[in-house]
Image (tube, rainbow, N blue to C red):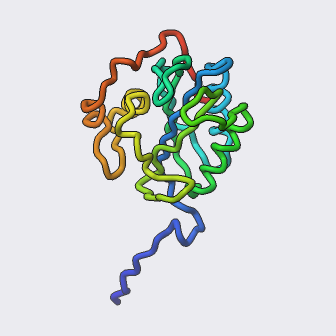
Amino acid sequence: MNYPVIDLDIDTLSGMKPLRRVVFSLGGNQGEVLETLQKAVDAIASTPDVIVTDVSSVYRTAPVGKTDQPDFLNIVVLAETMMSSSILLERVQAIEYYLGRVREERWGPRTIDIDLIQLGDRRRTDEHLTLPHPRAHERAFVLVPWLEADPGAELSGVGPVADLLADVDASGVERVEGATIHLP
């Protein structure tokens, strides 16, 4: 007897959503920055439905936009999630608030900045969020740690991170020896 072939999506039947790779860029230049970065990574990792898979080394970078302020310390965090971009954005903004982020001045000094760079191959453009991040391909402080954490990384719709990095000036991005952020 011949049975019909039925194409079933098991994730849909089980109620599970597929995991998507998420890339966060974190940085700060006020207060105890290494401690704040670690707390931010811990908070991201404690978020339900978010699994942190890797954290880059810590990099010191000159400020962008408003240059009369201290250098930043930056990292990239890689994770897997089932969350929507809206909920993920709300969560990282809550983490920023908890860690003392005050939004007074664009590109100004801050205790923490958490940017959502990419969420799988999701595309979004509205007043709250643009995915993938519209300037990630221009920012060595994002590309250098991202490439370290994931040598095969690609910025969705733009290209391989290694190729993008070849087109930007990364001379001001310096790895901070001895500074580490641990996976929770």
Q: Nearer the viewer, residue 21 or 170?
A: 170
Q: Residue furthest bottom?
A: 1
Quadrant where the N terminus is found in the figure:
bottom left
x and y percent of residue 88 in the render? 60, 50
- The reply to whether residue 82 is visible in this rendering is no
Where, by quadrant of the figure, is residue 103 drawn?
top right
x and y percent of residue 120 in the render? 44, 52
- The reply to whether residue 171 is visible in this rendering is yes
Rendered residue at 49%/38% (across/down)? 78
Q: Nearer the viewer, residue 2 or 37?
A: 37
Rendered residue at 63%/28% (across/down)? 110
x and y percent of residue 39 in the render? 68, 28
Q: Is residue 48 above or below residue 44?
A: below
Quadrant where the C terminus is found in the figure:
top right
In the displayed structure image, the side of residue 149 where residue 87 appears, left or right: right
Q: Nearer the viewer, residue 161 or 152?
A: 161
In the displayed structure image, the side of residue 82 where residue 95 appears, left or right: right
Rendered residue at 60%/49% (across/down)? 89
x and y percent of residue 2 in the render? 33, 88
Q: Tag count in the figure?
A: 0
Rendered residue at 38%/18% (across/down)? 172
Where, by quadrant of the figure, is residue 32 drawn?
top right
Q: Is residue 60 above or below residue 143?
A: above
